[in-house]
Amino acid sequence: MLISKGVFHKNLISLEKAKSRPQCRCGGKVVFFRAYNGESLCADCFNASIFDKVRRTISRYDMLRYGDKVGVAVSGGKDSTSLLYILSKIMKDHGSELYALTIDEGIEGYREESVRNAETLAKDLNIPLLVASYKEFFGFSLDEAMQERDAKGIKTTSCAMCGPLRRRSIDLAAEKLGVNLVATAHNLDDTLQTFYINLYSGDTERIRWLDPAYRPKQSEFKLRRIKPAMEIYEEELAFFAYLNKLPFQSESCPYMNEGIRTEIRLHLNELERKHPGTKYSTLKTVLAISSSLNLDESDRKKAIRCEKCGAVSTGRVCAACQTVELVKN
Ligand code: SF4
Ligand code: ZN
């Protein structure tokens, strides 16, 4: 997910709050106050806590195995640049190979900077990066898709059109790189938002998918996806990027403020502000619910092959091909 200005400013406020707090447990100068557990942390202890959380998530859900070829999806926002940086450090002696992949949706005046950021960071970390685009895979940019949508009076939101294209592009780029695993930078906030979206739309299968230990049948999905930052607050990842001077895009996607996700995000932020820790305890509930869902075969959307592209799909035509048809026809 891409950074919103509000989140970043909130971190600067956290920094201000932290300055007036007592010392960190190690005696160092406090730079961050973690409201949900009352911890005041110096830069080193804050960084160490983020590395520890990612390590714990990876090991708890058995996300990485020796010999994995991992592609990190890097949009150039604060979440994905932080994830690439963190994985580059903790996977150093792991025996896995690390790559980065960036999808250029084609958003003029916005995407160029984030692609540059991804390139700069990958170069600094000495990680091979593949940049692929919607134009290359589908024949049109997101800007062009949005123009077509508006001209045809299609009511679908930008993210509902962009999301399936993004996921498909990541699959295609991963295939090009030859990786068997894709790490995405979904954070705790993203996980909660996705839960509520699926709760409100009655999609129990997608709630089941939120369980990081859930392994769909190998025959259905060749590429494994992991979310190593899923237990970290969005504002903490933003602060991590800021603290470690990582290059990242600070503007939001110009098409972002459409759809229910933004409403849910604002609601959850408001709850967290009034009741620190709400997001963290909600995550525990979400994981307990998703892991205990035992979907009956009749509830489960059968995975079949898309009749246009042959990709695994729950419908006759997959969501990516439906979007391409909407734009082109
Ligand atoms: Fe992300 Fe939506 Fe922008 Fe696509 S349109 S890049 S899904 S915010
Ligand atoms: Zn298809």
Image: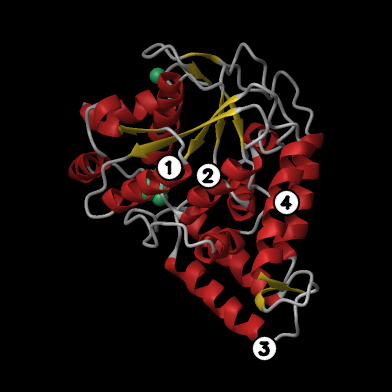
Q: Mark 2 points at which residue?
A: 84
Q: Can residue 158 be seen in this view?
A: no
Identify residue type, mark 2: Leu
Q: How far apart are marks 2 and 3 (CA)?
A: 32 Å
Give the distance between the C-alpha atoms of the residues marked 1 and 4, in whole angstroms: 23 Å
Identify the image quadrant of residue 10. bottom right
- Residue occupied by mark 1: 122
Assess whether mark 2 and mark 1 are in contact (beta carbons under 8 angstroms).
yes
Q: Position of residue 277 (x, y in %)?
A: 74, 66
Within 8 Å: ligand 1 and the Cβ of disc 3?
Answer: no
Kind of residue sitting beneath label 4: Lys
Which residue does the numbered mark 4 point to in the structure image? 53
The one of 326 and 234 positioned closer to us in this rendering:
234
Mark 3 crowdedness (10 Å alpha carbons): few <14, some 14-19, many ≥20: few
Q: Sequence-wise, which precedes: disc 3 or disc 1?
A: 3
Going by the numbered disc 1, the residue's amino acid type is Ala
Q: First in sequence: mark 1 or mark 4?
A: 4
Residues tagged 3 and 4 counted as in contact (Cβ below 8 A): no
Which residue is identified by label 3? 20
Q: Earlier in the sequence, mark 1 or mark 2?
A: 2
The percent position of residue 234, horizontal first and vertical second, equals 58, 59
Whole-angstrom CA distance, mark 3 to mark 4, is 26 Å
Where residue 167 sits, quadrant-wise, is top left
Give whichever of 210, 105 is nearer the camera: 105
Measure the C-alpha gap from mark 1 to mark 2: 8 Å
Reading the chain from its start, which is encountered first: label 2 or label 4? Answer: 4
Residue at 43% from the left image edge and 32% from the top image edge: 128
